Image (cartoon, rainbow, N blue to C red):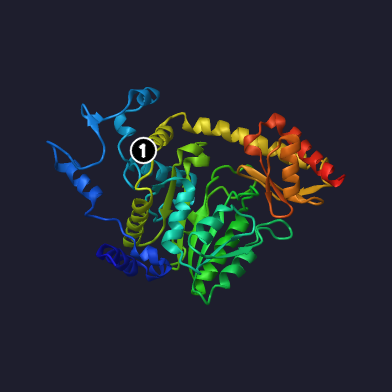
Amino acid sequence: MNPLAGQLNESIKTGNAHVYDMLSTLGKEIYFPKEGILSQSAEASAHAKKFNATIGIATEDGAPMHLEVIQQSLSAFKPQDLYPYAPPAGKPELRKAWRSKMVKENPSLENKKFSNPIVTNALTHGLSIVADLFVDEGDVVIYPDKNWENYELTFGIRRHAEIVNYPLFTEDMKFNSRGLREALLAQRHKGKAVVILNFPNNPTGYTPGVQEGQEIVAAIEEAAEAGINVVVVTDDAYFGLFFDDSLRESLFGKLVGLHPRILPIKVDGATKEEYVWGFRVGFITFAAEQDEVMNALEQKTLGIIRATISSGAHPSQTFVLRALQSPEFESQKEEKFAIMKGRANKVKSLLDSGKYGDVWEYYPFNSGYFMCLKLKTVDAETLRQHLIHKYGVGTIALGEHDLRVAFSCIEEEYLEELYDLIYQGVLDIQQG
């Protein structure tokens, strides 16, 4: 093992031995090199005032070399904020701005200890970092039966985790905290579990209420009290899009400092929150009571980033930072929120109108981009195929009976036509 990795491991052991036990083999072996090209380039940037021949970019007239055909489309930005490599952890100003945004939107984080967010190549990359650092073959990863399919690839296929699902909803259509609790406590013999909490949920668009949130936190704390080391990942991809009665904060804030055997990790990003999907700007944030633990986890995360993508895209980080600093940011976000809420409310009014109740029910939704129909009479994949080929309507089939509909990408005035066509598709299949 590299001595740097050993030093990081000792720091984690000293601060919280439970966190060390949570690390995967790769998580224990990974480190960020202090004597490689990046560190030598940083030293040269600070001291080599005559010639700096260290870093692999080209310069011209004291600025990063660039093509005018590209710069003319980006003339509002300085070349140094676009073309050089961004630091592996991301632009410092962006990390600071995102941390401030997190605290403002999650008041429960005030005066709590958590790391500076590290920039990732959107949320999938953040989840992949979690998988690399904390999941070995056979480790248990727990998330509900209604989930984003990429979890299976990220944790099951890439890291060979044992996936444990529990029903998302109870019979009265509340979050199934008992199912989560049972899945967690069943891991006593392993002594470790990774839990993914995704709210607003993809595919259902459901966020638990305050009492349900308390039950979730209590279940995780009970598992920790039972001697289970719990890595809790809040996948907050759609954070902020809360339309009806639900939690308004990430559960990350409630988990920070809760128990030495609980390691909260927040994965979020500008991708969906700020409607910049193609920018691929996400963040990963750790919470630990000991500075040495947070610092070591950050260094290991930088090692993963260095070994995979080296660093994130600089221009998109600059664009997001500029947006966060703009005085118009809040008002423009509120405009988009109102549009999204209007679409969600329109869908709910259509589904509650009685027009379609003979062929489907719907799962509760109060947030996010999606809602999910529970088909009563036809197979979801059969309906999906029929809709796309006869009516030119695209939906997502999930399992035998569930059909996901993204109201986020349909103008409010067309939503009734959309659901009428889905309904007609069901009738077509029923009639053979």
Rendering coords of residue 6 (x, y %):
28, 67
Rendering coords of residue 423 (x, y %):
80, 41
**From the image, which quarter does the N terminus lie in?**
bottom left
Residue that protrudes farthest toward the left in the picture: 50
Does residue 362 appear in this view?
no
The residue sitting at 32% across, 66% down in the picture is 9
**From the image, which quarter does the C terminus lie in?**
top right
Does residue 207 appear in this view?
yes
Q: Which of 224 and 381 is in front in this view?
A: 381
The answer to whether 185 is drawn above or below residue 169 in the figure is below
Amino acid type for the residue under numbered disc 1: His
Q: Quadrant of residue 76?
A: top left
Q: Quadrant of residue 163?
A: bottom right
Left or right: residue 36 compared with residue 377 = left
Q: How many labels does the image show?
A: 1
The answer to whether 329 is drawn above or below residue 402 in the figure is above
The residue sitting at 45% across, 56% down in the picture is 265
Which structural element holds mark 1?
A: helix
The residue sitting at 49% across, 44% down in the picture is 105
Disc 1 marks which residue? 314
Residue that protrudes farthest toward the right in the picture: 431
Q: Nearer the viewer, residue 98 or 69?
A: 69
Rendering coords of residue 62 (x, y %):
21, 29
